Image: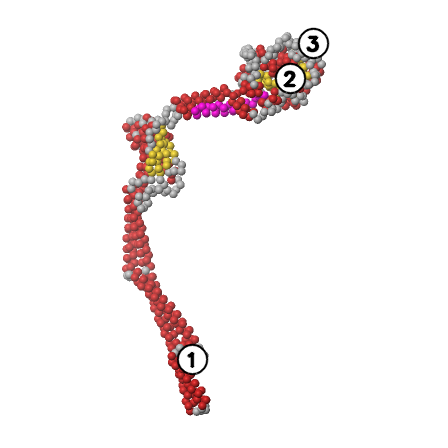
Amino acid sequence: MSPSASSGYEGEPQEAHLWEYIYVVLRRRRLVLAVFLGVAALATFRSLLTRPVYEASAQILIERDTPSVLTFKEVAQVDAARDDYYQTQYKLLQSRALVRRVIESMSLLQDPEFGGPRSAEEIEAVKAASPGASAVMERAIDEFLGKLKVVPIKSSRLVMVSYESFRPEMAAAAANGLSKLYIEQTLEFRYQTSSEAAQWLGQQIEEQKGKVEQAERALQQVKEQEGIVNIEERRTLLDQKLKELGTSLTTLRTERLEREALYNQMRGAANPEELPEVMRSPLVQSLRIELAGLERQQAQLLERYMDQHPEVVKVRNQIQETRKKIAAESQRVIRAAENDYKAYAAQEASVASALEAAKAEALDLSRRSVQYDTAKREAEAGKEVLNSLLSRHKQTDVAQELKNSNIRIVDPASVPRGPVRPRTTRDILYGVFLGLALGIGLAFFLDYLDNTIKTPEDVRKQLAAPLLAVIPEIANPAEVIIKSGVESPLADGYRLLRTSLSYSWPEAASRILLVTSTSAGEGKTVTSVNLALILASLGGRVLLVDCDLRRPQSHVLLRGRKSPGVSDLLVGQARPSEAIQRPAGTTLSLLASGTRAPSPADLMTLQTMRDFLDGLRGFYDWIVLDTPPVGPVAEALILAPLTDGVVVVVGAEMVPRNGLRQTLERVRETGTRLLGVVLNRAQVEKHSYYYGRYYGHYYGHYYSSAPSRPVAGSKVARIGDKRSAR
């Protein structure tokens, strides 16, 4: 790979980022400055010519709950639980009805800001018109609302009411007037609601009184029809009687069951004398004692006497008599238990009968009191509703007289000391910053749209091709051709190109170079002529061949003759010794284009040109072919495979990158060697920041000769005018 100017900065990609942005701004600094000055001037004029506007703000407090002065809640209390309560209040502050009241109370229709003054008849007509009917009032309301701002203060119940006016006193008066009328309107709404509620309650009370009287008459009629007197007392007595009879019946039934069980147990006993009830009888106990004594006496007598001894017989009879008494006493105890059981059964039956009679009486009373209870409930319910309505009516009467509001003015609006706009210093600073931002933004936008090659960095990044040399643009067309012994940036650029080409062929041999471009006007002919001149300056044999048969210019730049030339040699109308010429003041040879050919592409066939160039190769060290651009015609692509290398001339800021990439790709497709790119007509002064960064202050400062102006009508001047138009 050949050395190029790009090799010097391939190792500094890191610093390119910030410099690229700075370079974009500096390269279009005139545009940035124009936009900056224009916007800044516009902002300044606007700030100075705008009429001052003053703003006054009043701060009001809107409580959620109405302060409780009484022990009851207001009839018209605002529903504070709803989330849209405050939003509703904000809209009420900006309602057209409230603004109309402000306009009428402050006589704003006579104010110049609202189109005043007006005649008294017109004012009366506007005030008498219904809402929405007067165009004058509607315009005034719209204008007032346009100057009004209602801003809630975050995380508080405070609201800022602001008004703008051309007069500071007017701004303060409007803000305070709106706030006061808003509070009055809220109280009026509340009073109106209370009045409507009182009126409705009065109607309901009268209706309810009639209902209560009707219910009481119905209750009295039921009493007379059913013959019910002191029904509540009778119900109480019956309930008490039923309760007592029920308790007595339960007790008697329990006692009866116990005695019945005892009697059944005693009646079924095998030895009644052993029953506990019999054993507890005092008589039985004394008889048993007596029986025990007789039995001991009998035992003693039997020890002394025989069984039939009168004493023994007497005692035995006494024993039998005692036992009979015990048996008789046992039967008496059993009969007593039976009688006791039967007595309790009789009592139970009597109480049960009385209970059933009481139940029947209660059922009869309940049947007779059904209509009574219904009529009584209706009468009591009617009285309760009537009492509630009377209580609410009294509360509403008090609420109508209560002048209490949940809205207060915390800070009234004061007369502003200075306008809110225009703020001259701030507006001018905004204009300065905006102009700078727009200028820089426009510069970057135009740079984004500009897809041409401008600098060596663009060649390296966008074309991925070696950069052989950078040729600066020369303003004076008389100086586009280098002269022997004259030092200039132009000559040094071509010397760098010569050095780069020399590195491409270390060995000494005859070399054929093809110079082309993408489109016309990029300076390929000037590059070909100067390259041939700089190669010839080392004493070598150099031949410049003008292969651009359509628009030949080499003979014009070197002040030679046009024919005979290439076309004459190819058709056999001239010999090489006749066609090849040496321009005056140079050491190179020139083969001009020759007579104009009708079809240059058909004339320059591959085989014809191969034979032609092979014949010339043995006589010259360097052969430079100036060919037409690659884009419009095919001659350059036909000749490229016959050469040792192709040099593509790129006019700075002239051809889009895509077109250049296509040109390089088409050259590579021919199979020839692409030596590199020459960035021609580089705008060194325009991009002085870039070139100063890479080349220091070489261009424009190293040589003392000042640049001259182009001659009017020359080719360089025409190309410069074309570029300026672009």
What residue is disc 2 on?
A: 499
Is 126 colored magenta in this rendering?
Answer: no
Residue corresponding to mark 3: 577
Residue 29 place in picture, x, y as percent: 50, 20
Which class describes the residues within 10 Å of circle 3: few (<14), some (14-19), or many (20+)?
A: few
Secondary structure at badge 3 equals helix
Q: Quadrant of residue 179?
A: top left
The amino acid at mark 3 is Ser
Q: Quadrant of residue 630?
A: top right
Residue bounds of the magenta highlight: 429-456
The circle on residue 273 is 1
Q: Residue drawn 28% across and 42% down?
A: 401
Judged from this view, the residue extending furthest toward the top is: 584
> From this viewpoint, is residue 580 visible?
yes
Camera-near label (3 vs 1) is 1
Task: Find the distance from the CA under tag 1 to the CA under tag 2.
Answer: 161 Å
